[in-house]
Image: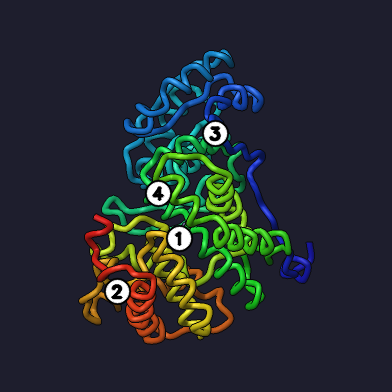
Amino acid sequence: MSEETDRTPVSVFTSPGRYVQGRGALGRLGTLLGGLGSRRPLVLTDDVVRGLTEEVITESFAQADLPLIFERFGGVPTSAEADRVSAVINEGEHDIVIGLGGGTAIDTAKAAGDNTGVPWVSAATVASTDAPTSALSVVYTESGSFESYRFYDRNPALVVVDTQYVAQAPVRFLSAGVGDAFATWIEARAVRRAHTTNMVGGRPTHAGTALAELCWELLWRSALPALEAVEKNLVTPDVEAVVEATTLLSGLGFESGGLAAAHAVHDGLTAVEQTHHLTHGEKVNLGSLTQLVLEGAPASEIDPFAEFTARAGLPTTLTEAGLGDAGDAVLDEVVRAATAPSETIHKLAFTPTHRDVVEALRAVEGIGRRARARVGLGEPTPEDYR
Ligand SMILES: [Zn+2]
């Protein structure tokens, strides 16, 4: 390949091999794994999820004549945990690894699969992040700070999302998924405007960007009735639509459409202890608001977004993130991490300065407070998320 060809930007779209979503989908896991040629799968999950799913999975694996071997997930997706699970895969001669539960178990299964050269499968029982479909993991430090993204050559071979479990989980999980998924279009749109690259090193395809936009539309249409349904443990068409948005569309949309400032601000927020009571999608929502401020989005765009996400149970103020009284030193630490050279904030069409980002974060407080007041929510407090 000539040097010039090598540098010519190409468009790249990536996706998992198969996506299966619905009530009772987990009961099909055994058959689906058999279809992938697996004879000796390893299921990585924590004790809580194991307790909730063991009966269904036992029956499903028995039907497919597969041995059922669980490995207990340590809880934090660190490199050390991935190495530990890799050793289990090698010793047990497993031919596939399934991350069962939420984003952290799923991301660890991906890392262990990549370490050992076996395919990996995402089996989601909550819809709190878009981790299940992507070919990357978020690696955390032992203390729960963002460490890095780890990129793989392959997406999961299979993604299974059981909406019955999603509806039985605390509504906060789905709400967080909505926060993560709303950012997808805000960020993909910025990457498209800036002609920068997506998460797989290419220009976004029209398909990648369009899926991000569809994700946004489905959330506006269905997120509030879906959250209401999940409060009552119901699976409705709105719930199915929102789970598709938070898992499939957000996953494809962020990876193939690209990330920008919202996730960079999320990563920055993880750098300080005060925010650790918030989940990924909750912190991302503050990142979305910060990106909109940085972009100079009009009030006609920011205000309805802040109101809607507040109604969806998401934080819209620094106060909820435990940063209501944060001094400059704390916000400096957040912004240093958010603007690190490897961060996706540099995919924007412009380069915000350190001070720009600090002041955008401070501006979010007032925007969020006023939005909460307009929709009849009380004073923001971090206690709502503890
Ligand atoms: Zn995310």
Tell me the kind of residue under disc 2.
Glu
Q: Position of residue 99 (x, y in %)?
A: 47, 36
Reading the image, the residue beneath label 3 is 23
Q: Position of residue 92 (x, y in %)?
A: 45, 22
Question: Is residue 182 rendered to the left or right of residue 231?
Answer: right
Tell me the kind of residue under disc 1.
Gly
Mark sitting on residue 173: 4
Q: Is mark 2 within 8 Å of ligand 1?
A: no
Reading the image, the residue beneath label 1 is 179
In which quadrant of the rendered view does residue 289 lie?
bottom left
Q: CA distance from mark 4 to mark 3?
A: 17 Å
Which class describes the residues within 10 Å of circle 2: few (<14), some (14-19), or many (20+)? some
Q: Which mark's residue is nearer the viewer, 2 or 3?
A: 3
Tell me the kind of residue under disc 3.
Arg
Q: CA distance from mark 4 to mark 1?
A: 10 Å
Question: Is residue 364 rendered to the left or right of residue 89?
Answer: left
Tell me which numbered mark, 2 or 4, is placed earlier along the sequence: 4
**Looking at the image, how many numbered discs can be counted on the residues?**
4
Q: Which mark's residue is nearer the viewer, 2 or 4?
A: 4
Residue at 57% x, 53% y is 245
Q: Which mark's residue is nearer the viewer, 3 or 1?
A: 3
In which quadrant of the rendered view does residue 145 lie?
bottom left
Tell me which numbered mark, 1 or 2, is placed earlier along the sequence: 1
Question: Is residue 329 rendered to the left or right of residue 278?
Answer: left
- Contact between marks 2 and 3 (CB within 8 A): the answer is no
Reading the image, the residue beneath label 2 is 333
Q: Is residue 370 above or below residue 32?
A: below
Residue at 24% x, 63% y is 382
Q: Secondary structure at mark 4?
A: helix
Q: CA distance from mark 1 to mark 2?
A: 23 Å
Q: Secondary structure at mark 1?
A: helix
Tell me which numbered mark, 4 or 1, is placed earlier along the sequence: 4
